[in-house]
Amino acid sequence: MRPFKYTSANDASAAVNLVTGNPNARFLAGGTNLLDLMKEDVERPDELIDITRLPLTQIRRLTTGTNQGGITIGSLGTNTDAANHPLIRQDYPLLTQAILAGASGQIRNMATNGGNLLQRTRCPYFYDVAMPCNKREPGTGCGALEGINRMHAIFGWSEKCVAVYPSDMAVALAALDAVVKVSPPGGKERMIPFADFHRLPGDTPEKDTNLNHGELITAIELPKNRFADHAYYLKVRDRSSYAFALVSVAAALDLQGAGNRIAQARIALGGVAHKPWRALKAEQLLVGKEATEANFRLAAEAAMADARPLAHNRFKVELGKRSIVRALHMALTGGKA
Amino acid sequence: MQEKENVVGTPISRIDGLAKVTGKADYSTDHPVKNAAYAILFKSTIAAGRITDIDTAEAEKAPGVLAVITHKNAPKLNVKGGLRGGAMLQSPVVEFYGQHIGIVVAETFEQARHASHLVKVTYDKAAARVDFDKLVGEAVRPKDKEDEKRGDAKAALRAAEIAFEAVYATPIEHHHPLEPHATIAEWNGGQLTLYNSSQIVNGAQNATAATLNIKPEQVRIITPYIGGGFGSKGGQWANLVLTAVAAKQVNRPVKLALTRQQMVNSVGLRQHNHQKMSLGATKDGKLTALAHEITTHCAINEEFVEPCGDCSKLMYAVPNSLITYRVVPMNLILPTYTRGPGKATGSFALESAMDELAYKLNMDPVGFRLKNEPARDPSNGKPWSSRTTVQCLTEGAKAFGWEKRKLEPRQLRDGNTLIGYGVACGTYPARQRPSSALVKLKREGSDVTAIVELAAADLGTGTYTILTQTAADALGLPLNRINVRIGDSTLPPAAGSVGSVGASSYANVVNDACIKITDELMARSGKQYYTRPTASQLMISEKIDSYQTRVDSDAPEGADEYSSHSFNANFAEVRVDMATGMVRVSRFLAVTGAGKILNPKTARSQIIGGVVWGIGMALTEESVVDPRWGNFVTRSLADYHVPANLDIGTMEVLFVREEDTRSNKMGVKGIGEVGIVGVAAAVANAVFNATGKRIRELPMTPDKLL
């Protein structure tokens, strides 16, 4: 990797100021993605500000604010700790399932919650500096568009980039309407709704998120919800563990009264777009309906209606439909097949 | 004196285990060499053409850099010296994507890697031959592979009562041992020491010497431990000699380890095989014809073809047989031996086709195989030294609960999953190769110790352990009085740990050396013995302080009058998720006949390793080339999917009892290769039995099962 300056920060505002002062500086948390990318010369920061000592690891119930009754998750806690926290296991089992579906035990022990949201794509053309990639080097072209694109997007892609966003955790966070709490340089904290946090590639695929340079994620907030009993994260992949999703589905149902009537539904997909993909039409379609296999199938059709598959990933459309039905079914039965 | 119990055949734990789990075992670049510099290779980013300019100025000025070596300043090497795959910086010609085009040597690894990114290369690109599907029509017969004909297979197929034909495809695979290829080179005047992961110790020595135009005696290979090789560390590659070149250039020891990303185009691969399989049979299930027509690829100007037809030519009694190879030269790295070379991939075609034909005949696939059991090796008419296929199938079927299998697919389900059973057989030749060994005995009072020396290699599979057991029994000493020294080219020359020849070659020569030393000690005593004393007893009774002897061994006379092989039968139970297409091998039984099992524990582990490889081949492993540029897009273990723990269900390993001293005196057959043979077909056959879907193109990823 290229030589870089390393500083360990003791408080958040100092860290923010250090990164803000140098356009080539980056925060370093778990390092599970950034350091790999630096070794391959994909990421080329000349300064790293180590934030792992900042006291941003707490997970607790929110007693005030817009998400009162929900929880806040410190950005620098590890994925392992988040997945296993009693509040999350009890109230947000979807998040536990999604985190545990990702990476490996060793990686989850290092990776942080904030860092998880900032993972770069695993597109092989992005990872190989000898290949064209607009995300890595704007203007060089997209290697995957007409290349090997079995793992790539079927929604929201552009001619500039067909990469998918790799996180499992974020798919659950999207379904759970998380809010990302951010410390900007000099200013006061801002709250970014999850749907606005990640971006579609458009003409600027080099930008994965709407964070500005120097902004630090301090926490992720989850509003209170009624999905805990009926939520399921399904991940379909090429091997049983330590593989990125071909398609993943975070499904959650809020069932009220008799006859399994759906008050609210959440369906978010992973492995299909440049960001966690909420199937809003499908969710809407389920509201007020009975939780039946037939309705799940209608929702699945609606979710996939606008899919635009590439040469090698046509299977994701059918797989996506089946996975949505399966995930909703599993959510309905509380995780039992 | 009490008779010591034999330790050969007992499941002792590997004697190097503690050193390995405590980090005391030195792998190649772990050796504590003082003042070492670090080298990294850099590679071409085109698949064919010429380097017109290579600008190293910026790299040379980067912090810590000691040297940058390219074809412009590399010393002249003998590219025909026995190393595989070329890429030795001898010319500006580029023959495949990711060919080595230079080395950076620096004070630290990261400085070297950084500087390598600063080298600017310009090319004159030529049209690259990298798209197999487009080139397949240009395939030619390889120079060293005549078509193998017996009878008239084509006519017999036309005349067959029941005929079957299908094409089976296996993808490019990489070996990806956990320890990448790594070397330390240290020159001392004209003497070169190479700490290098080598499956063939003397082979690495000779190839290095020939390539550098020096004498073999000037080269010492040290390789006490190997972190996996699977064939990629058998024949050695350019990285070995380039480390020596770098060390000479900077006049310091140099360490060079390939990165995981560099492994895909540095040390060979298992080639993509396109196999057309035709079978003919009578209505009652006697095979009448077999044609196995293989098309594959090799390097642009060097041939290598893995022998996919080897199982087909001898597994079953077929009067008419045809095996052909055709090969397409391509701008890809030279393929090489990969676990179960030819047999792992060829058996996928043969054993899938046998299953398909059995289904067509409405026969149980175990019974179909038993019906076509050959009395002699049909490929050469020789008697078997022993053949255990029938035992493996029948004992395996019983142990596995095969009778629960339904002939029709889609009969067993559990919730959302379909359950299926599959069977497939395999084989691999059993051979003993020339090897030498030195046994040294020492006595202090009544404490006798032995040192056993030979230039063998331990891939991590248990060579140290089985040789300690062999020597302990043959000398009459406890295990802890035996010190086995291997992995050093200054020791007596030995066969490689390749092609399943290691255990038989090494155990026999060590046993022979121990017998010889006992004979010599008896003769030296001048006494008559009613019962044969042990070497240990003789050292004590004759008050000898030290004694040594050396022996050279080879396969016993007459061994080649027989056809000698290990055989297996594989039974798989799979569970297929009907919605997502995800396949899980929930249970697997491998039954193997491999002669005398020296250590059931290390043998079991080795078979499990082979089965896991086979499951990877069946379900997950695939190296993908971008057909526009010839580069691999699967460059890391996140993209190249070897099975994870969760992919592997219950594993059962059985060995059938057999005594086969025709193939070698100790009756030891190899198990390193046979473990993978037939595994992928067993899984594919089970997937068909579960789902009714026949997948003929590996790996069976979820998309193929939708």
Image (cartoon, rainbow, N blue to C red):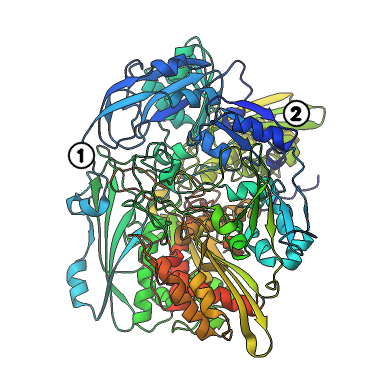
**To which residue does mark 1 refer?**
B127
Q: Quadrant of the C terminus of chain B?
A: bottom left
On the image, the x and y values in percent for residue B419 come to 53, 77
Helix, strand or loop under label 2? loop
Residue at mark 1: chain: B
* Nearer-the-camera pick, B254 or B607: B254
How many numbered circles are shown?
2
- The answer to whether B62 is drawn above or below residue B273 in the figure is above
Q: Amino acid at mark 2?
A: Glu
Can residue B430 be seen in this snapshot? Answer: yes
Question: How busy is the neighbourhood of tag 1: few (under 14 within 10 Å), some, or many (20 plus)?
Answer: few
Nearer to us of marks 2 and 1 is 1
On the image, the x and y values in percent for residue B249 come to 44, 13
* Farthest residue, direction bottom: A259
Marks 2 and 1 close (CB-CB < 8 Å): no
Helix, strand or loop under label 1? loop
On the image, the x and y values in percent for residue B134 come to 21, 53
- The answer to whether A252 is drawn above or below residue A62 in the figure is below
Residue at mark 2: chain: B
- The answer to whether B575 is drawn above or below residue B460 in the figure is below
**To which residue does mark 2 refer?**
B542
Instruction: Report which quarter residue B464 is drawn in.
Output: top right
